[in-house]
Image: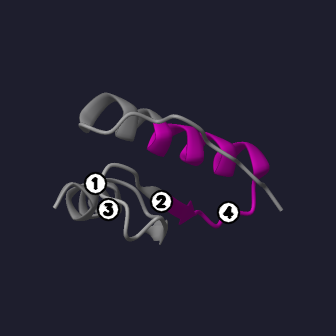
């Protein structure tokens, strides 16, 4: 329920694709991946940081690690 709540809240607030991508069988750990498409690197970076801040500030989850890749 926590994962679905985080995913739906992020989808509704930000225009990103998001989903649980790993550790599906582990109940005390979640791995979420999300992607944003933009023609501007700084806009994409800002969007990603806003999503991370939103999850950190508004959810019961604690972000332990994040990996950002901009192509």
Q: Residues within 10 Å of mark 3 (few under 14, many from 20)?
A: some
Q: Nearer the viewer, residue 26 or 6?
A: 26
Q: Is residue 70 left or right of residue 12?
A: right
The magenta segment is 32-52
Q: Say what secondary structure mark 3 lies in.
A: helix
Q: Could you tell which of marks 4 and 3 lies nearer the N-terminus?
A: 3
Residue 6, image quadrant:
bottom left
Mark 2 vs mark 3, CA separation in Å: 8 Å
Q: Which residue is mark 4?
A: 38
Q: Which residue is mark 2?
A: 32
Q: Which residue is mark 1?
A: 6
Identify which residue is drawn at 43% across, 63% down. Answer: 15
Q: Nearer the viewer, residue 62 or 34?
A: 62
Q: Which residue is mark 3?
A: 7
Identify which residue is drawn at 71% across, 48% down. Answer: 68
Of the residues tagged 2 and 3, which is closer to the observer? 2
Mark 4 vs mark 3, CA separation in Å: 20 Å
Percent of width and height locating residue 5: 20, 58
Q: Could you tell which of marks 4 and 2 lies nearer the N-terminus?
A: 2
Q: Say what secondary structure mark 1 lies in.
A: helix
**Do callouts 1 and 2 mark residues in contact (Cβ within 8 Å)?**
yes
Q: Say what secondary structure mark 4 lies in.
A: loop
* Residue 19 sits inside the magenta stretch: no
Mark 1 vs mark 2, CA separation in Å: 9 Å
Identify which residue is drawn at 73% across, 42% down. Answer: 42
Identify which residue is drawn at 75% across, 54% down. Answer: 40
Residue 69, image quadrant:
bottom right
Label tally: 4
Q: Say what secondary structure mark 2 lies in.
A: strand
């Amino acid at each position: 329920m926590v994962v679905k709540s985080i995913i739906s809240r992020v989808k509704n607030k930000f225009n990103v694709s998001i989903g649980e991508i790993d550790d599906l069988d582990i109940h005390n750990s979640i791995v979420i991946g999300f992607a944003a498409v933009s023609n501007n690197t700084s806009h994409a970076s800002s969007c990603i940081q806003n999503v991370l801040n939103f999850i950190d500030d508004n959810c019961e989850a604690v972000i332990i690690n994040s990996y950002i890749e901009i192509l």
